[in-house]
Image: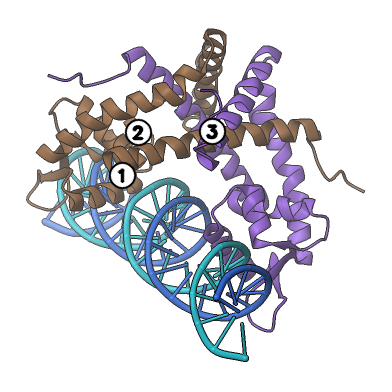
Chain colours: A brown, B purple, C blue, D cyan
Amino acid sequence: MTETRSLEPEEWEFWDTWMRAQRLLTRELERGLQRDCDISKAEFSVLVTLWQAAGREMRVGELSESLDWDKSRVSHQLTRMEKRGFVKRTQYGADGRRAGIGLTAEGRRAAQTAIFVHGGNIRRHFLDSLTPEQASVIRAWSEQAVDRLNRHGSNAASDGAS
Amino acid sequence: MTETRSLEPEEWEFWDTWMRAQRLLTRELERGLQRDCDISKAEFSVLVTLWQAAGREMRVGELSESLDWDKSRVSHQLTRMEKRGFVKRTQYGADGRRAGIGLTAEGRRAAQTAIFVHGGNIRRHFLDSLTPEQASVIRAWSEQAVDRLNRHGSNAASDGAS
DNA sequence: CCCAGAGAGTTGTCACGTCAACTCTAGATT
DNA sequence: AATCTAGAGTTGACGTGACAACTCTCTGGG
C-alpha cells in the first residue's frame, strides 16, 4: 500500500508549532489593535499604506500592488472603510471608474495613533522576544522566502538572473 | 507633539518582510491543498485531528481544545463539512445536544491523501528551504513563542515571577 | 466609423473566523 | 421536587479573503 504520510512525526510537530506560534502572535496583535485602536488588521494595512503616501492619492491598482492583495479585496475593503469614514474615493472620469483613494481627517488620525500603538505591541510581542541571533536568522529566512515565493506566484518565466 | 511611531523604519521593514513571508507561504500551501486535494486549510485541520483520533469519536469541545479554535468556529466548520460529506455528528441525548463527531468513509479517504500530499508540499516549500541553523533557530523561537503567548491568553493572573 | 480586446474597478458569491446571544442538559442548591 | 446555574453546542450577524463575472473606458485595426 501507499505511504500515508510524507513527513516524519517530528517534522509535523515542527510545522504545527510554527503555525501555532504565528497564529497566536497574529491573534494577540490583532486583538491589541482592536482593543486599543478599534480597527482591524486589514484596516491597519490600508491606513498605513495610504499614510505613507503622505497625502498623495493612490489608485486601487497601486494599493493592490503595494499590499499584495487581490484588487477585489482592496475594493471591498475600501467600501467598508468608506462607510466607517476612514477613506474617500474621488472620481476622475465623468463616470464612476478611475477613483483616487485618500484618507479622511479621521483616517489620518486613526492611522497616526495606530502606527504608534501597534508598533509598540509589535515590539513587545515580537521584537523583544528575539535574541539578536534569532532576529538575524529569521530576517534572513524571511527575505529568502519572499524572494522565492514571489518568483513562483507572479512570473514563472522571467528568470533573467543568469 | 507625540511621536508618530514607536518602531524604526528598519524594524518596520523586518516586521513587514516576516509577515509577507508567512502570508506567501500560507497562501501557496493553501492553494496547493485546494488544487491537489480540493479541500481548504480549515478542512484539512479538522480532517487531520479526527484522523489522529483513529476512529474514536470526538466531542466539539475536544476539537476546539485540540485545534485551539473557538467552539463556534468548530461548529460552523462542522456544519460545512457535514454538508460536504466529510464528517458526521452522532447524537447522544434524546435531544440534539451532545454530539460525537466522526469521519465518514469519504472523510477518511480525503484525510489520508491530503496528509500525504500536503506533507510533501510542506517539505518542498518550507522544510527544504531551511538551512539546519535556520531550522533550529526557528523551531526554538516557535516553542518559546507558543509558551509565552499561551500563558497570556489562558490565564492572566498566574504571574509568579514577582 | 465600428468593433475587438486590454486595463481598471466593482460586484456577487461563497468559505472562513469572531463575537455575542441563544438553547438545552445536567448537576447543584434549597 | 422545583429551580438555578454552569457547561456544551448552535445560531446569527458581520468583517474578511478568494475567485469569477461583470462594466466601463480606452486604444488599435479593419
| SS under mark 1 | helix
> Measured from the top left, where is residue C6 in percent x and y?
32, 41
Residue at (9, 43) in percent of width and height: A92
Q: Is residue C12 above or below residue A97?
A: below
The answer for how far apart the CA atoms under marks 1 and 2 are is 9 Å
- The three-letter code of the residue at mark 1 reads Val
Q: Residues within 10 Å of mark 1 (few under 14, many from 20)?
A: many
Q: Is residue D18 above or below residue B25?
A: below
Residue at (60, 35) in percent of width and height: A19
From the image, which quarter does the C terminus of chain A lie in?
top right
Q: Are marks 1 and 2 in contact (CB under 8 Å)?
A: yes
> Measured from the top left, where is residue A109 in percent x and y?
15, 34
- Looking at the image, is mark 1 or mark 3 nearer the viewer? 3
Q: Chain of mark 3?
A: B
- Please name whichever residue, A31 or B29, is drawn nearer the observer in this view of the structure: A31
Q: Is residue B22 visible?
A: yes
Earlier residue among tags 1 and 2: 2
Q: Residues within 10 Å of mark 2 (few under 14, many from 20)?
A: some
Disc number for residue A74: 1
Q: Residues within 10 Å of mark 3 (few under 14, many from 20)?
A: some
Q: Chain of mark 1?
A: A
Q: Which residue is mark 2?
A: A67
Q: Is residue A26 above or below residue D5?
A: above
> Measured from the top left, where is residue B101 in percent x and y?
71, 65
Q: Which residue is mark 3?
A: B149
Q: Chain of mark 2?
A: A
